[in-house]
Image (cartoon, grey):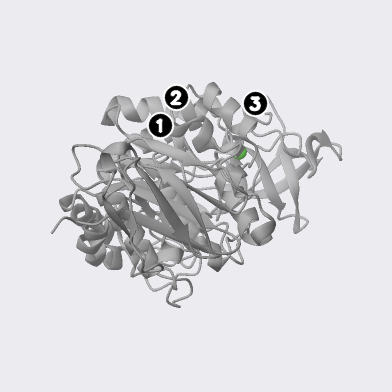
Amino acid sequence: MENGVIMQYFEWNLPNDGNLWKQLKADASHLHDIGVTAVWIPPAYKADEQQDEGYAIYDLYDLGEFDQKSTIRTKYGTKDELKAMIGELHKYHISVYLDVVLNHKAGGDFTEKFMVVEVDPQNRTEPISEQFEVQGWTGYLFHGRNNKYSDFKWHWYHFSGTGFDDAKRRSGIFQIVGEGKFWSEGVDKENGNYDFLLANDIDLDHPEVVTELNRWGKWVSNELNLDGMRLDAIKHMKDQFIKQFLETIRAERGENFYAVGEYWNGDLETLDNYLESVGNKVNLFDVPLHYNLFQASQVGKEYDLQNILKNTLVEHHPELAVTFVDNHDSQQGSSLESQIEDWFKPLAYGLILLMKDGYPCLFYGDYYGVKGEKSPHTLIIDILLDARRKYAYGEQVNYFDDPSIAGFIRKGDDEHTGSGLVFLMSNDVQGAKVMSLGKERGGEIWYELTGSIKENVVIDKEGNGTFSVNGRNLAVWIKEKAG
Ligand code: CA
C-alpha cells in the first residue's frame, strides 16, 4: 500500500461500554477520507473480566459470542458487531489487523495441583526453592462455549509457569517442572530468560499447544477475514513458534498476510537478531525510535536532532519498521510509560508521516484523545496525513546537519502531480535552512502548509530555497499550485 498508515484504534482508558466496534464501523468512511489504510484493533476475545482491555485473555474462540465470565460481549462489543465493523472497513479498503495474545492465559476455570520451583524474578534461570506442589488456576473448560469451534481443554501441562499459588494465596514466578518442562529458548534475555510475563505462561514447546494455536490462527483469520495481525509480547515467546505460526497462517491466507510484532526493547541489536532468527517474516514496532522521540521531547533544546534517527529500526531495516509515536503501553499511567510530551508530538508525527521509510502507526489517543478528553493534536495530524497522501513522494534528501533544526526534502515524483515537500523541525528557537530542491524548480513559489509561517519562499535559479521553521515547532513546505 503506497503511503499506507496504520491506526491503532484504542487507548488504555476507553470506557467499558461495549461500543468500540460500533464506533469504529461508523468511523470507517472518515478514516478512509483522512488516509488511514489499516486499523489495528484490540484483542477481541473474552478476557478474565468484561472490563479487561483484552490482554488478560481467557478464551481465544469467544469473540463476544458466548456467556462466559458473566458476559457475552467483551469490553468492545459482540462478535456480530465485530464482524459488521470489519465488513464496513473492508468496503473502504481499510485492512484490519487483530491484536493477538498468545503468550499467556488468565482467568482459569478451576485449580490444578502440580509441581514447580520458584525462580528469582531478576534471573528466572535461578531456582530459589526446592520443588514443591502448588495449586494453580490452570484448568480451562469453556463451559459456555460447549466445544463449539474447538474441544481443546487447557491444563497445567500446557503451561510453563504460573504467577499464583492458590494453596498458599501467594504470588511469585513458579516454573512448572516435569518431563519436557523448561523456559523456552529464543526469548528475550532480560531477567535471565523472559519467557514468563504474567498469569499462566503458555508452553510453546508443547506439541498439543502448537497444533491448537495454529488451528486457532487459521480459524480466526478466516472467521474475521483478517488482513493481518499485531502480535503481542513476542519477546516473551519462542521465536521459532512465531516463525512457524506465520508460515501456517500465510499458507492459509496468502503471503501478503501482514504481521507486526511488539518486541518491546529499545536496543537495535536485539531487534536485529530477532529479525534474523525469524527470517524477517515479521515487521517490528520501532521501539528505539520511540525512545529517541521520548528523549527529544524530554530534553528539549539540549537534544541533538542530528541523532533523532540514530540506532533506530527504520534507519537499519526501513522495510520492516513500523514507526509510531505513542501507544496504549507508553501512554501515561501504563506499564511501559514513556509518553512523548505534547509540544513535541506534532514534530514526531511530521517526521514519521512524511519520511520515506517505515510504515507509520497513528495512535487513537493522539488523534481522538484519552479518557474522553479531546486531543489537542487532531488538526495537525489531519494536515500531516493529507500531506502524506498528496506530497510525500519521491527521493528523500536529509538535512540532519544541525543540533536544533533538522529535516528533509521529498523530491516528488511524476505519478503525483505537484508532489514533493520540505519538512523541518526545531527544538530551540526560530531558524532557517538553505535547501537545494534542484535547478528544475528554479522560480517556483513554495508556502508553508500548517499555517505557522505566512511568507512564501521563492526558489532561486540554482534551485535553492531558504526555508524557515518556528521555535519548538514544525514546518511543512510545498509548492504553490499554479493559477
Ligand atoms: Ca512466554
Is 48 above or below relative to 114?
below
Amino acid found under the numbered disc labelled 1: Asn
Amino acid found under the numbered disc labelled 3: Glu
**Quarter-of-image position of residue 132:** top right
N-terminal of the pair, mark 1 or mark 2, is: 1
For residue 61, say whether it is visible: no
Label 1 close to label 2 by CB (< 8 Å): yes
Task: Tell me residue 443's x, y (percent).
Answer: 26, 49
In what element is the residue under mark 3?
loop
Picture quarter with the N terminus: top left
Mark 1 to mark 3: distance in Å? 19 Å
Mark 1 to mark 2: distance in Å? 9 Å
Residue drawn at point x = 18 percent, y = 53 percent: 92
Which residue corresponds to mark 3? Answer: 185
Amino acid found under the numbered disc labelled 2: Gln
> In this view, which residue lies farthest toward the bottom?
373
Query: Which circle, 1 or 2, is nearer the viewer?
Result: 2
Residue drawn at point x = 21 percent, y = 48 percent: 418
Is 37 above or below relative to 335?
above
Which residue corresponds to mark 2? Answer: 244
- Badge 2: few (under 14), some or many (20 or more) residues near its Cα, within 10 Å? some
**Quarter-of-image position of residue 319:** top left
Residue drawn at point x = 65 percent, y = 37 percent: 267
Which residue corresponds to mark 1? Answer: 214
Query: Which circle, 1 or 3, is nearer the viewer?
Result: 3
Task: Tell me residue 107's x, y (percent).
Answer: 55, 56
Is 396 above or below relative to 179?
below
